[in-house]
């Protein structure tokens, strides 16, 4: 539901991330995707079921990934890192380790890129196929994350991006996710933070269970294409 307040100059979704202009008129959302307690209860229940089923079905793949990391890069198969979740609450995110060990300060403040020299051969494969993200099913089961939502970032970069990009902090209104609208539109890795915030806030403003299902379907499709390439 939108309140039309007067003529505007820009149509579409502005760089700040909120779709506050409609058909040339300035508009303010009276209700967004965060104002649906019943829907969010269903979303949480679906997350728990999907994560539990996913952990069971993916167990053989996760075991193979863990073994490959252990043989290739030695001990320390699971990588743990503090990330910022819904309403700014910190949590420990889990991934398969893809980089050589780094000290805590470097790990928390260094931006990762595809050409990072710390990537091992196994790590590069895990990232390309997104298999390194599978341990986050446990984060979803615990309630730290959702299956779909804005991707969580490290506290250092959340503070930095919030200062540089209006609307970035607003993306923490919803639970963070394993995948999201920004990611299925190609905004993953070393891509525009401003564009990511714009897609994330659009997802929040227009959230529905159907949209979550569509994002999950598009994510699964992209993974199957990678597996077949």
Image (spheres, grey):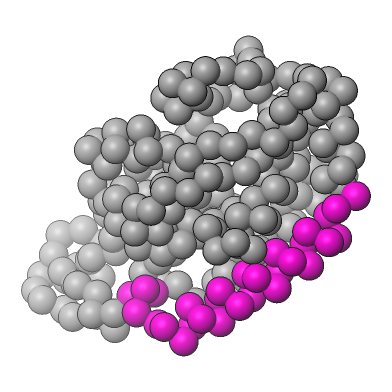
Relative to residue 203, is residue 152 depicted above or below? above
* Quadrant of the frame with the N terminus: bottom left
The majority secondary structure of the magenta stretch comes to: helix
Specify the quadrant of the image occupied by residue 32: bottom left
- Residue 62, image x and y in percent? 82, 45
Q: Which residue is drawn at 61% across and 78% down?
A: 45
Specify the quadrant of the image occupied by residue 207: bottom left
Q: Which residue lies furthest to the left in this view?
A: 6
Of residues 211 and 161, the one nearer the viewer is: 161
Of residues 191 and 102, the one nearer the viewer is: 102
In-image side of 124 versus 18 (left or right): right
Residue 205 visible from this viewpoint: yes
In-image side of 91 versus 186 (left or right): left
- Residue 70, image x and y in percent? 83, 26
Q: Give the range drawn in magenta.
A: 32-60
* Quadrant of the frame with the C terminus: top right
Relative to residue 54, is residue 132 depicted above or below? above
């Amino acid at each position: 539901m939108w309140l039309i307040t007067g003529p505007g100059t820009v149509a579409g979704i502005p760089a700040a991330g909120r779709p506050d202009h409609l058909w040339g008129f300035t508009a303010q959302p009276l209700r967004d995707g965060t104002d649906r307690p019943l829907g969010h209860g269903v979303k949480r229940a679906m997350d728990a079921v999907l994560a539990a089923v996913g952990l069971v079905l993916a167990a053989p793949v996760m075991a193979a990934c863990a073994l490959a990391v252990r043989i290739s890069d030695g001990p320390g198969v699971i990588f743990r890192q503090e990330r910022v979740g819904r309403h700014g609450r910190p949590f420990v995110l889990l991934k398969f380790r893809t980089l050589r060990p780094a000290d805590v300060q470097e790990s928390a403040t260094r931006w990762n890129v595809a050409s990072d020299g710390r990537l091992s051969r196994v790590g590069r494969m895990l990232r390309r196929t997104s298999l390194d993200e599978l341990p986050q099913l446990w984060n979803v089961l615990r309630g730290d994350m959702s299956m779909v939502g804005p991707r969580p970032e490290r506290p250092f970069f959340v503070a930095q991006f919030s200062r540089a990009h209006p609307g970035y902090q607003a993306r923490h209104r919803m639970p963070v996710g394993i995948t999201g609208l920004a990611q299925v539109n190609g905004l993953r890795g070393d891509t525009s933070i401003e564009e990511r915030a714009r897609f994330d806030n659009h997802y929040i403003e227009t959230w529905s269970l159907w949209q979550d299902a569509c994002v999950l379907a598009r994510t699964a499709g992209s993974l199957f294409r990678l597996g077949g390439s």
